[in-house]
Structure formats: C-alpha cells, structure tokens
Image: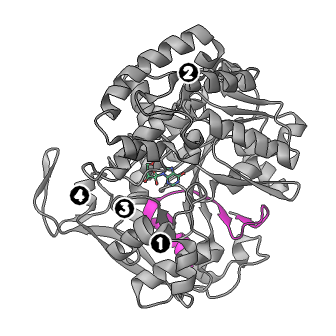
Amino acid sequence: MKKLERFLGGIKTLAVLCLQYGDTGKGKFVDLFAKWAHIIVRGNGADNAGHTICYKGKKLITHIIPSGIMYDNVGKTNIVGSGCAVYPKTFKGELLGLDAIGCSYNNLRIAHNAKLILPDHIVMDRIKELNNSGVKIGTTGKGVGPVFADHTARTGLIMNDLLNKDIFVKKLRHHLIDKVRILKTYDTEALKKVMSHEHLENGIYFDAKNIFNEDVIIQKYLDYGQDFNLMIRDTDEFIRSQAGKTEILLEGAQGLLLSVDEGASPHVTSSNCSLSGLSKGAGLLDSSQVDKCLGIIKGFYTTRVGEGPFPTEFGASESDKWCNGVGSRKQELELYPLASVNDVNQFLRGVAYRREGDEYGATTGRPRRTGRLDLPLLRYSLQFFNPAYLTLILTKLDCLNDCEVIEICDQYKYVGPDFRVGEKILRAGDYLNKAIMIREVLEYCQPIYSLHEGWLCSLKGISKYENLPKQIRIILNYLVAQTKVDLGILSIGADRNANVFI
Ligand code: IMP
C-alpha cells in the first residue's frame, strides 16, 4: 500500500484506460485504485464491456456497474456516467447479482442523461450483423452502435425519461415509428428469432404485426425506472462539484483503438474511449481536470475481439476466421491440447497465447484474436496524451514466461496499391513508424519485427524492478527508447498485489 500511496501522491483525479483494443486487464487496476478513490465513475461504453469483480471471495462478472462497487460498504460513490449507455435489463441483473453475493450498492448512481438502450437498438445491432450485405463488425450485440447513433441523430432517450411516464410513452412511440419502418423490410421470422433471445427478455417485446409490443416495453421500462428511481441523478453536476476536492477514479471501457473517433472505422465501438471521451463522459469539463492517466497495454502482446485489421495477428486470417466464426474455448482445448507459445505454426502459437492469457471474452465468451505487441499502433495511441501526465502499465507479463522469443513489431511495410492519405500518397514499399488508422491502409501493412530473448522463468513473488529477469528489463528499455513513454507498473499475476512498481 505504501508504494501505491507514493505513486498516487498529490493526485485527485486519476484515469485508467486501455491503449489497445480493450481487455488489457484494466479491472485489476481499477480495483486497486478504487480502494484509494472516493468516487469511481465509468465514462464511456455500455454492457459491451466486462470485468470480473471479487467480493469476499465470491466472483461476479459485471458489464456496466463500475468495479469499485465492492467497496460500497466503506462509503464510496460509484457512478455510471453520462457518456455511457445503459440497458436496464443488464443493470437490474447486475444489481441482483450483487444482492446474491451480499454486496450493497447504496451509493450507486446513474447519470440522468446516460443514454437508454431500448429493445430496437439490440434488434437492429443483431439483425445488421446477421445480414450479410453490410460490413461485419463482430459487435457484442448489445445495441451499442444504434443507441449512440440515435443519440447523435437526436432521436434517442435518456435514463431520466424513465422517471416521467408521459414523456417516456410519448418519446418511445415517436422513436419507434422510424425503427418499425426500417425493420419491416426484414424477414419477420428472422426478427422473431432475434427477439426471442434471452437478452431481449425471451421475446416479450415481439409483436408479429407491429414488430414491437409497445405496451410491454412501456410497462417493463417504467418498472425498471421504479427500480432505479433513487439512483438516477445529475451525476455530471456532482462530479464537477467534487473535481479537485476528492479522489476520483475514471474507469475507461474498451480501448483507444476501438474508440469511435480514434479507431479505424467501421471496426470500432460507438463511444469515445479516449481520455477526452472518458473525462467528458464521466462529467468532468475536460481531460485537463485529470491529474494522471494510466494507460494500459498487455506486456508484449495484443488481443482483439471482433472483426477488423490486425497486422501482428498470430496465424493471420486463419486466426481471424477461427475466432470470429467457429472457435470456442472448449473446441480449442479438444483440438489443440498441445499448442505451444513457441510453436512454429503461427495459428497454434496464437492459440497458446490465448490459453496462457485466458483470452476469452468476458461478455461474449469469444476467443480473442492474439498477436504481437505493435509499436506503430502504440505510437499512434500515445499521441492522444500529454506525456507529462501519462504513465504506462503493462499487464499479464507472467503469461509469456514460457516464450523463447518475444517478437515486437517496430514498423510496418505498406504493401498495398497507391493510396492517398490527405496530401500524401502511400506507395508499396513505404515504411510506417506510426499506424495510419484507416482500415484500407492497415489491411496492407506488413509488420517488421525485432526479436527479443524471452526470460523463461516464473515471475512469482518479484516485487522490485531490479529483481526482474534481465531479459524483461532489456525489453522494457527497448520499449521506452522506442516510444519515450514513462513506465509505471508491471502486472505479473492476477493477484491484486502481483505488481512491480517502477
Ligand atoms: P460494439 O461495441 O458491441 O458495437 O462492438 C464493436 C467492436 O468493439 C467489436 O469488434 C467488439 O468486439 C469490440 N468491443 C466492444 N466492447 C469490447 C470490449 O469491452 N473489449 C474488447 N472489444 C470490445
């Protein structure tokens, strides 16, 4: 704890966010710093995120409730901020989950202006992904794209609407007119199937004639409104009033490379996962109110869930196809029990990385695509931060204990057709040090790797930098030299205390 206190000296507002494609183990650090903070606030995303929380030895996977909830009994406030979208069924399910493990949530708040996920958002998200005519994104199917699209199009609803029956009914009916018109162009049986899903309350919202049974939606959502009645507050105002006075932890969701503004569209999520998106969505005026930002990456590898270019992927398209289509954790174990992180077969090497890192989605259970650490992408991410306020955390280093060689992508060689990027023309054979976040460019980027000796030993029990294997220190020095980033913490195990502060 002393090291932690030193690390946090003088800080009032701390942000934790991922610099890759999410799933970098933010939860562990949010958990660690939640102990320090008085207010823990999520500022972006929805129930597309997922993290496991432990409360008195019991585990619970949450998707929207901030991880600090397990400290509720010591008077902390947990907030789902205005930059988030909330699906009431998920939220209620998580409250019931907390009840089941005996964790109280008296101080849980939802921003009154958080976006409200309605059944049509989920239907639209899922039916679009099923329909082969569009670009497949591999969404989590939680309605995230449609709810944020409606927010921007000014046709969405907010959590506060649940507290005003007449307004809710009027807005919902109006909202559904266009949705029904569009959904009527789809096959009714396909719609019925999508809507029969448990996530859509097993078909209760379906109506064969009108697509949606509005009365059922109204009843159900107003009931949810009653359940959350005391939690829905003007949290933006609260956060603004507390900024600089009390310890606030901003909990990012997803990762910068999935951010709607910073990522390579269309393979992104629909909220802004950057520091500025997180700050604004948490209720701060802007990111200048954040004293320190902890940017998280995986120690020397990368994962990605869903579709989209991934230049350093082990096993390239074979892995992509497997993870986005047929693969599952169980199948992998049965088919590839002997896959090794040193396998010459790149696909199998990726399987082994997945297994070592337990890289299976907390939200969807999908196998995550695995690849090497990608410095062009990291350099891209780093430019969105003031280096004076950014500290890097590397997680999961212990997952690579058996790797004989660590490959790091230093730069890309562009191998595609001539491509205009603003005033420049990218030509085959050009080298890129920093990624260009345009899908059509990334698809033609060939990684150039440097090879680094692995450490081939356990990291268990190490708490000091100087006690780390020299091979790790060499790679870390290389990383700093290549990116000029400040290193803060290395995570060398799932345990809350398995960290090396630098
Ligand atoms: P959506 O956010 O469900 O619309 O999905 C858009 C893309 O972001 C898909 O590729 C998802 O797999 C990815 N995505 C969304 N949330 C997460 C997350 O928490 N971790 C990793 N990937 C995510």
Mark 4 or mark 3: which comes first in sequence? 3
Of 12 and 296, nearer the camera is 296
x%, y% of residue 284?
Answer: 59, 26
Element at label 4 = helix
Which label lies toward us, 1 or 2? 2
Residue 376 marker: 3
Q: Are marks 2 and 4 in contact (CB under 8 Å)?
A: no
Q: What residue is disc 2 on?
A: 215
Cα gap from disc 4 to disc 1, whole angstroms: 27 Å
Amino acid on which the number 2 mark rests in the picture: Asp
Would residue 62 be visible to someone looking at this image? Answer: yes
Residue under label 4, please give it: 441
Task: State the residue lying farthest toward the front.
Answer: 209
The image shows residue 105, relative to residue 455, as above or below, that is above
Q: Is residue 369 toward the left or the right of residue 363 in the image?
A: left
Range drawn in magenta: 473-500
What separation in Å lies between label 4 and label 3 (alpha carbons)? 13 Å
Q: Which residue is mark 1?
A: 327
**Which of marks 2 and 1 precedes in the sequence?**
2
Label 2 C-beta lies within 8 Å of the nearest ligand 1 atom: no
Residue 216 vs residue 454, the one in the foreground: 216
Q: Check contact, mark 1 vs mark 2: CB within 8 A.
A: no
Taking the spot 55% from the left edge, 57% from the top edge, the residue there is 364
Image mark for residue 269: none
x then y, percent, for residue 18 = 54, 52
Q: Is residue 312 visible?
A: no
